[in-house]
Image (tube, helix red, strand yellow):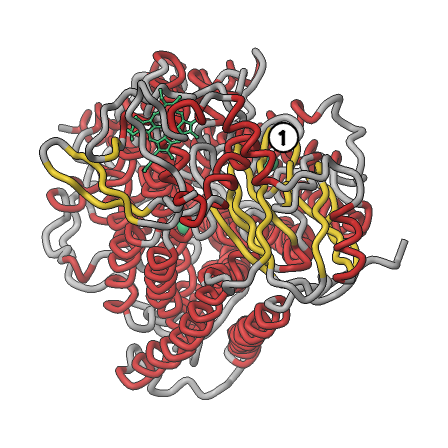
Amino acid sequence: MSAMAVEFKEDYLQAYRLKSWLLTTDHKRIGLLYMATITFFFFVGGAAATIMRLELMTPKGDVLPSPDAYNRLFTMHGVVMIFFFLIPSIPAVLGNFLIPLMIGARDLAFPILNLLSWYVLMIGGSIAIGILIFGGVDTGWTFYTPFSTMFSNTMVVPAATAVFIAGFSSILTGLNFIVTVHTMRAPGMTWFRLPLFVWALYATSLIQVLGTPVLAIAVALVAVERLLHVGIFDPALGGDPILFQHLFWFYSHPAVYIMLLPSMGVVAEIVPCFSRRPIFGYKLIAFSSVAIAVLGFLVWGHHMFVSGQSMYAGMIFSFLSFMVAIPSAIKVFNWTATMYKGSVRLDTPMLYALGFIGLFTMGGLTGLMLASVAIDVHVHDTYFVVAHFHYIMVGGAVMGYLGGIHFWWPKMSGRMYSELLGKLSALTVFIGFNLTFFPQFVLGYLGMPRRYYEYPAEFQVLNVMSTAGASILAVGYVLPLAYLLFSLRRPPDAGPNPWRASGLEWQTDSPPPVHNFEEIPIVTRGPYQYSPEGAEAIDGNGDDASR
Amino acid sequence: MWNFPLFPDQASTIAKHVDALYFFALGIAGFFTAMICVLILAFAARYRRKSTADRLNPPTASRTLEIIWIGGPMLLMLTMFTWAAILFYKMYDPPVDALEVYVVGKQWMWHAQHSEGRAEINELHVPLGRPIRLTMTSQDVIHSFFIPAFRVKQDVLPGRYTTMWFEPAKIGRYHLFCAEYCGTNHSAMGGWVYVMEPVEFQQWLSQAGTGASMAEQGERLFVQYHCAGCHRGSQTVHAPRLEGVYGRPVPVQQGTEVRFTLADYRYIRDSILRPKSEVVAGYEPVMPSFEGQITEPDLLKIIAYIKSIGAKEATQ
Ligand SMILES: [Cu+2]
Ligand SMILES: [Cu+2]
């Protein structure tokens, strides 16, 4: 009995041998495995972006030896960032780590499956890296047919395979989360006592499970046509190239929400904590996550307004795209309203969260312009679209991810990081991001098409601004990597709850013990038990604990 | 260096309408972004931890507020949607008197052909003040024909015809881009669109070239590919006369049933490349397939020829 108790005290990071990591079924450790993996891929994708931005400093192609090299770079940038960073980012890292802690469980429903998901991603990822080393692909991450099936002479089939395999990791993770949320909640943890982060991840998981198989089919068919010359997409073989676009976007539009919803969940945790106020309109936010997941499946045609699909189809997709903006707008207003009459402190996670709200708002509103068919005809496939989706996926999803990492780092590692450097990084990212991508809206409306290796000279000034911004952004991303790793040199000092947050995950030690909770908690209240009164007193304590 | 544009030319009749909608949307975007940012900054300042601001009775949900911020944006969005959809409809619907130009995209160049016969590469000459209708197809992968100054863009697909139209409104030279990624030299697949005075344009049309119109060139091909042998009345083969067929419903045999199909660009193209797919009722499927033998520009010429032979000649 006493031996058990001693073992219990051991936190989940205690065993150091490699094998204990590679064979772990502990959701927290798997979360960290994912974190290491996607951090690696983030910097690979980032390196590709850096070279691209350097190339685009001048109108003529001069940094890279050939247009082919450029085409391979933007393809790898897209494939790596989307399938190997953004899609697994928050769900697989924070979701893995936090869902059991947040709902008061000892682990996910299927711990071994969870480990398998990571290995599956690693296999897909290794293939992707192999492609990068042995020649590359030049189809764009969108794999448009018939270029990808019959014309490109690069490694399309391996790339399709990598995406196909990575997709299964995503499906299995989603499945695991859904079952966990349904079956593993602690006594008293009713659906409306779930943190909004869990609601968001639940909605995300639905998309992962329902959407990803369609992507798998689409890329598998690409491989079939390419290898066996069965006419599916190429009209010369009797196929239909638009069919591919339908299949591809049927997944890839909802995929945007796989990247975004979890970030929204993170923000819904951070804003109440640093405003010392319960979230405003809990139920509406929870339902809007589900609404986004459902409506998100009905708008894929907005990527195809000028593809040759019928005019009326275009109008219907336009209408539905406007509708999907409503639940997003609700969330933005509700987060903002949460700060009203609160007791606000702008710590690093809060800065990231507020940055998220601003950038996501801009991304969403420019999305409305794209949903307006007549405007989209002009800006489709230009830098306007590039800017728009980076506002959503980098300004939104990545900001949210970093906010989450900074919020839960004390829980995951048991350590605090330098608050000063943290704030500096949040600010650098925000400024660098805007400088990089705002000029691209202007470029896009001017008519600069995307995926251009060379461009007319009159676009140069705006491109130089964008490249300058990218270099600032790069600093903003390297900074957290450095100080977070650096924080590991000290012994754990964060204490169980440095932010005085009210979620279940904060009621156990930092880092949490192997089995999360000494005793399964019995839940008697909602997740956001904050009140602005007496916040200052708490504050003092928090500072003590963190220093 | 500091002399660079921030806004594109408005060189077509539709451009100013698209821009008007764009500025409306921009206004909405600007307003809401500013509103959210101001609110966040104001709350962060007023309710900062150290402040003694009034924090009594904070709301945790409000039906009225939520209805306002669902209803308000909803109304604005419906306005944007309707406005954009109406404009889109206009952009789709070409006036009947539009001048016809035919475009073929291939890796990595644009080939344009005027009905009067003159062809050009990576350039497009058009007259001021006349609606122009482009009928486009691709010889290989998907491309996209994009003229930013006109605010028009349309994907160009292999195996089918897509169309778009515009009316140039300003003399000048404007960028022509390929907007859909199409392989190695995607970024070099472009050129210039020249908007000219109608008189100059007429001169330009008659300069150089073969002098033969597209339909005349098509007729030569019609003979060259032995279409004429069957289709101009043959003793040995029973084949339909093609005079007046364009634009008419044609009876097509489908199993035991007869269905009517409009003889448009798609139908005639398919009749030539895949004759077995739609066989005219009452005829044997003896026509050979010309798949892979006739280039896209030549196909367009043959179709132009078939289009040009009206019912009048049929009686001759
Ligand atoms: Cu989309
Ligand atoms: Cu192209």
Q: Position of residue B102 (x, y in %)?
A: 57, 43
Q: Residue furthest right?
A: B1
State the residue in front, A499 or A263.
A263
Disc 1 residue: CB within 8 Å of ligand 2: no
Element type at mark 1: helix
> In percent of the image, x 18 and y 27: which residue is there?
A4
| Relative to A355, B261 lies left or right | left
> In percent of the image, x 50 and y 78: which residue is there?
B47
**Dot 1, how many residues are within 10 Å of its Cα: few (below 14), some (14-19), or many (20+)?**
many
From this viewpoint, is residue A431 visible? Answer: no
Q: Position of residue B142 (x, y in %)?
A: 51, 35
From this viewpoint, is residue A53 visible? Answer: yes
Instruction: Tell how many labels.
Output: 1
Q: Position of residue B20 (x, y in %)?
A: 59, 74
* Rendered-image quadrant of the N terminus of chain A: top left
> In percent of the image, x 49 and y 71: which residue is there?
A344
Rendered position, A472 above or below B10: above
* Amino acid type shown at disc 1: Ala
Report which residue position mark 1 lands on: A48
Rendered position, A73 above or below B164: above
Residue A51, quarter of picture: top right
Residue A20, quarter of picture: top left
Label 1 resides on the chain identified as A
| Relative to A444, B90 lies left or right | left
Q: Position of residue A207 (x, y in %)?
A: 27, 44
